[in-house]
């Protein structure tokens, strides 16, 4: 009888140690599911801006590169006559890097952070065209 009681007590102690780990796993899975649901409901944001020379002139036909830092996918936009560019429907939970190129010259790379809560971010790019 003593062996049986000891075995039951040992099993109960084992379950007592496993229960918090299992509970933690269940809470983590639930928190992740809630996080994913919230992200899927987030409204997309957009990035707009202008590409200009160092003298302030708009650069038509400059190529703007937008890189998703999670997936490394790169999108491009060729600027309009006013030097304007736009990237709609961007995920608010992703960081993006943006730069422009024009006739062999390149702007500095700027970052659109996931912490930037604006629905429409504005980043202007400047290219030194006097090289």
Image: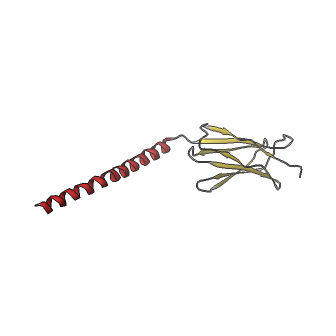
- Residue at the image point whose x is 18% and y is 58% from the top: 8
* Whole-percent x, y for residue 11 in the image: 22, 58
Q: Is residue 18 left or right of residue 44?
A: left
Query: Along the line of sight, which residue is nearer the eye, 13 or 27?
Result: 13
Q: Residue furthest right?
A: 130
Query: Along the line of sight, which residue is nearer the eye, 14 or 76?
Result: 14
How many numbered discs sit on the rendered protein? Answer: 0
**Colour scheme of the picture:** secondary structure
* Whole-percent x, y for residue 86 in the image: 68, 44
Q: Give residue 3's quadrant in the image.
A: bottom left
Q: Residue furthest left?
A: 1
- Residue at the image point whose x is 40% and y is 49% from the top: 28
Q: Is residue 122 above or below residue 109?
A: above
Q: Is residue 21 above or below residue 86?
A: below
Q: Give residue 74's quadrant in the image.
A: bottom right
Query: Along the line of sight, which residue is nearer the eye, 62 or 93?
Result: 93
Q: Is residue 45 left or right of residue 128?
A: left
* Whole-percent x, y for residue 90 in the image: 60, 45
* Whole-percent x, y for residue 41 in the image: 48, 41
Q: Residue furthest front?
A: 2
Q: Is residue 3 left or right of residue 18?
A: left
Image quarter where the N terminus lies is: bottom left
- Residue at the image point whose x is 30% and y is 54% from the top: 17
């Amino acid at each position: 009888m003593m062996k049986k009681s000891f075995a039951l007590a040992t099993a109960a102690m084992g379950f007592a140690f496993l229960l918090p780990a299992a509970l933690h796993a269940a809470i983590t899975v639930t928190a992740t599911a809630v996080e994913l649901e919230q992200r899927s409901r987030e409204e997309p944001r957009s990035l707009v801006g202008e590409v200009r020379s160092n003298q302030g002139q708009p650069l038509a036909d400059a190529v703007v590169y937008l890189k998703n830092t999670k997936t490394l996918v790169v999108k491009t936009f060729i600027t309009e006559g006013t030097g304007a560019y736009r990237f709609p429907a961007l995920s608010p939970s992703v960081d993006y890097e943006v730069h422009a190129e024009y006739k062999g010259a390149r702007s500095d790379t700027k970052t659109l952070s996931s912490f930037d809560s604006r629905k429409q971010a504005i980043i202007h790019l400047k290219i030194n065209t006097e090289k």
